Image (cartoon, rainbow, N blue to C red):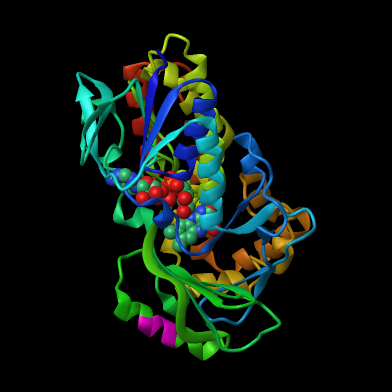
Amino acid sequence: MANRILVAGGGHGGIAAAALLARRGYSVTVYEKHAREAMGYDWTDIFDGRAFAAVGMEYPQKGTFRPKPDMTFYSPSLTVPVRQRTTADTRDIQMERKEIYNRLISYAQQAGVTFVYRTQVLEPVIFGNRVVGIRTEQGIEYADLVIDAAGIDSPLRSRLPASLGIQNHVDESEQLYVYRGFYEKAADITEDKFKFLLLHQNIPGLCWVAAEKDYTDVLIGRFHAFDMDEVESTLQVLRQSEKCLGTKLLRGGCFARIPVRQPLGVLVADGYAAIGDSAFMTMPVIGSGIANSLRAAAILARAVTADKSGAFSAQTLWNYQRGFYKEIGNKTAPLACVTQMLAKCTGSELDYIFESGILHTDDMAISVGLHDMDSILGILKPDGVKRKLKGLAGNRALRSKLLQTGVRISEAAAVTAAMPKAYDDRKVTSWVKKYDACFKR
Ligand SMILES: Cc1cc2nc3c(=O)[nH]c(=O)nc-3n(C[C@H](O)[C@H](O)[C@H](O)COP(=O)(O)OP(=O)(O)OC[C@H]3O[C@@H](n4cnc5c(N)ncnc54)[C@H](O)[C@@H]3O)c2cc1C
């Protein structure tokens, strides 16, 4: 009989892994709390379109996506724009979230995955130290492997026993609280159609305002929870400078949260693997949650199929952990230090970074987009280094903050690289302590 695999939550990575595993003969069922038509937010996302290929899917058809738009970044003073132009070889595309789900779900269904909608997963079922199933509103379901794709608030990850060594909770400062809505377009604009307003009104977080063809896309992001009163007052302030932003909400208009922290230290336990937002696979600062989840799905499917014994133990699933960190986590984890630094920057420090040329439009002429460590380090091109050093020379406090961040990035990179090669309780516990400590200061 085929091994039974349950996917808790219809996250992107979970559905993609389900499809790959069903194609290889496993019996896979996805439990999703929403109805099918309610899945996916009513807005668009930007991600590397080639991630579909990683899970064996075709590149999306023309007409279902558009290239990532040019973006302009501003510090709170709104004085100096830093522009990032999309070039012919930019790999990022903008696509409706519902369309991404349409593609993933039909791919999984064709592969033989069963979907159970409108069913809330409540907690993991544990026997000894092994995850042996899930408890849903409808009862207990046993499985040989449970894949946790239930997002940032996963009821599985957050209820795993401490003995499994998997971090349960996300700190307040490790998530960005966001409100996003598509509003009526009040005016056509020709320049800087997609604006990122960092530390807008000097509030830790960011806003974006993007004038699209038929609407204006607004995101308000904060490092604290906020309510509709704060949304309305922020929209009022934004309307004073952003003439394209109208008053009538057309689509979206809801709150959500994005993990902005390092990936989960330990992704696996006996009978359990976490993927997507449940394992914090977003790239801090940049996003990339969708592409990273799809790529992780391919790595997970490889590790599962390589386990011919069907044990799906922490030992055999460790190949997933190692593969994820080798391909993705080794870049995303160090970048978490940059997010922490940015979250602690004051408005005047950020203004200085923009106004002194430490960050400049020339730095953003990176064809691949800011989507990996190499491209981030592209900012340190020799011709720009002189300008940055000159800028930093004028601000000692900022210079020391940036130097400290540089040291922390290298520490995080070194610890990540030193991950145990094979799963061993004692070694993994000691490694994850060091890993988590890199992000604690
Ligand atoms: C405003 C906003 C903008 C974003 N923009 C981008 C972008 O442009 N590009 C990008 O790559 N990423 C973006 N992201 C991040 C992206 O949404 C995630 O990183 C990505 O979707 C991976 O998360 P996930 O699919 O694992 O989790 P989720 O999207 O949270 O999906 C989890 C699924 O599990 C289901 N679920 C949750 N709990 C239960 C339960 N108890 N029982 C059953 N089912 C459950 C949920 O209904 C949902 O279907 C954005 C996020 C937000 C909030």
Foreground of the two, 290 or 398: 290
The quadrant where residue 437 appears: top left
- 107 up-or-down from 305: above or below: below
Residue 365 falls within the magenta-colored stretch: no
Residue closest to the far top: 309
Magenta span: helix, strand or loop, mainly? Answer: helix
**Which quadrant of the structure image shows residue 154?**
top left
Q: Residue placed at 41% from the left, 13% from the top? A: 310
The residue drawn where x is 63% and y is 78% is 80
Residue 81 seen by the camera: yes
Residue 85, quarter of the rendered image: bottom right
Residue 285 visible in image: no
Q: Quadrant of the N terminus?
A: top left
- Magenta segment: 232-236
Q: Position of residue 143 (x, y in %)?
A: 31, 23
Residue 232, given in percent of the width and then of the height, sits at 37, 82
Residue 65 at x, y = what percent?
Answer: 66, 58
Q: Position of residue 184 (x, y in %)?
A: 52, 83
Q: Residue at x 26, y 28 (%)?
A: 141
Q: Is residue 149 left or right of residue 153?
A: right
Is 59 displayed left or right of 234 in the figure? right
